[in-house]
Image: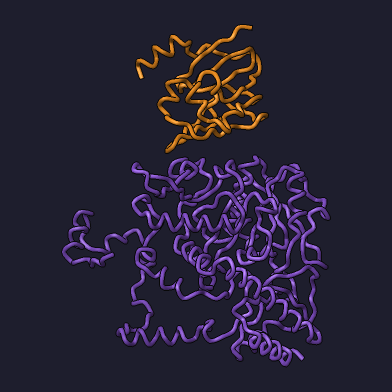
Amino acid sequence: MSEQLRFTKEHEWLLVKGNIIRVGISDYAQNELGDIVFVDLPSVGDRVEEGEGIAALESVKAVSDVYSPVAGEVVAVNEALEDSPELVNESPLDEGWIVEIEVEGVAQTGDLMTKEEYEAFLKGV
Amino acid sequence: MRYLPLTEEERQEMLQSLGVDKIEDLFTAIPEEMRLRTDLDLPAPLSEAELIRHFTELANKNNDLKSSVSFLGAGSYDHLVPSVIKHLVGRGEFLTAYTPYQPEITQGVLQSIFEFQTLICQLTGMEAANASMYDGASALAEAALMACAATRRELVVLPSSLHPEWQDVVRLYLENQDVSIAYLPYDENTGIVDPKAFDGISWSEVACVVVQQPNFFGLLENVASFKQIAEESGALLVMAVDPISLSLLKSPGELGADIVVGDGQSLGSAMGFGGPSLGFFATSSTKLIRRMPGRVVGETVDSEGTRGFVLTLQTREQHIRREKATSNICSNQALNALIAAIYLSVMGKEGFRDVGYQSLQKANYMKGRLLEIDGLSSPFSAPSFREFVIQGAVDWDEVNMRLAEHGFVGGLPLARFGLPEMVLFSVTEARTKEEIDSFVNLLRGLIS
């Protein structure tokens, strides 16, 4: 099954593997937030709606919510972030992933940006 | 703050900018017939000397602990307060300061709070404490909410041996949240709770189980049984503790508590008609700290490597997290927290232990003496600390009126909590053997 990496305007990335979607934040976003000191993760089994906060990233003086780009059920969380929140800064697209959400049916990625489109989008930010 | 009276000129200016001629024009919305046309029925003004005389007369009607000997507790205790406390907390730097809004420039206040937090951690055996809460009851309510957030569960278990007024406060805090409360009844013979003896609770849904140590009746609960059931059901153990009792008892940390709260009045604060007091709040793990309400002072170093203090973990608080904050408390009881910190430092490890030991000994001496009186009995069999319940077919309100005539404040009649015939006495280290003996003899005369 092919994997598709997509980005949202809220600077999250989605890695789509069938009906499982892995979510993290972009390199641009981690850079803007600064050093992440704590990641407030949801629980496996939580139901989330599209646009609902699923996690919170805490930097030294601010907290930013991570919004779920899809509706579904949380099937995995990156537990490594509990002890090593800095992974979000060091490896935002890989080891710093945040949650995996299982969607019903096939994930809709039509509105999302490809890597190239996101890079073009960032130039306008 | 300076008092700046309003001049007639300024008054005219304001009226002009509002576009009205006179003050009465501001009240046109009030129907004519509703307006008061006569003067208020108030006494004539008094001169300063008359005013002082008047209030002195009123104040003299109050009974205070300088002129009477008290055996009343039930949440507020007459422990001895070292004189140094009044002297130190009376300093303007502390007395007039409000919760720091630009905290880092007031390093002294932050350091005093940091010392308070450290002492609370030592006392409770917890990892982290906050800068203090309003009082013990509201601290317990916040602990229940914190447990719900941490476990993502919505059921809080309270023991019925918890102070009834604390139960009310917790209920008030929780009733408009999606949280339910279940109660564990206490055993009518022992006066304490056996959490396993009651099977009306679905433990897998419980966010936290609360235990008050000592409980409302002054009795020592078996905390291990609470810990066991909390552990088995994935719930947090919340302990509401009397800080003085920690001078003798195992720390909540050793007993496996996840959150510890309590009222800090007994640590050097005056009884003062029930306040102001302070609540303390501590938790056991770095993971739970993120869920803790209130302000937290942390120790750090500045750019030159010098030790300094900051408000830390503010991202839990409502000025940053808005509606997702752990709590809406954004203040603390700084002056009372300072009092508690000075009290613990001045008493020291041994002095503090003496306070607990003498309170325990004197309370149990008095309990024994009272039980010698015909018609009085001890309704509960569990061991007690500084307070105990006595039962007798006596009009305790009437007895208390008579005791007051002799300069004694009696115990708290429990009839208003649905326990007729019972009365709750408190004995601290401040009571002498002579006071206890006189009280017991007087009481014997009054009820036989």
Where is residue A75? Give x, y as percent.
66, 24
Quadrant of the rendering where the C terminus of chain A is positioned: top left
Chain A shade in the render: orange
Which quarter of the picture shows residue B153? top right
* Residue nearest the viewer, comparing B154 with B30: B154
Residue at the image point whose x is 62% and y is 42% from the top: B150
Residue closer to the observer: B23 or B237: B237
Q: Position of residue A52 (x, y in %)?
A: 54, 29
Q: Quadrant of the N terminus of chain A?
A: top right
Instruction: Identify which residue is drawn at 64% across, 79% down.
Output: B71
Count of numbered labels shown in the rendering: 0
A112 left or right of B350 in image = left
Which residue appears farthest toward the left when viewing the image?
Answer: B9
| Residue B191 falls left or right of residue B65 | right
Q: In this view, which residue lies farthest toward the top?
A: A2
* Left or right, B196 with reference to A117: right
**Residue B67 in the image: above or below residue B127:** below
Residue at x 78% of width, y 81% of height: B392
Q: Indicate how the structure is coloured in the image.
A: by chain
Question: Where B448 sits versus B366, above or below?
Answer: below
B226 with respect to B275 (left or right):
right
Q: Is residue B289 above or below residue B270?
A: above
**Quarter where residue B108 is shown:** bottom left
Q: Position of residue B358 (x, y in %)?
A: 65, 75
Q: Where residue B393 sits in the image (x, y, percent)?
A: 78, 82
- Identified at 63% across, 44% down, the residue is B148
Give chain B's shade. purple
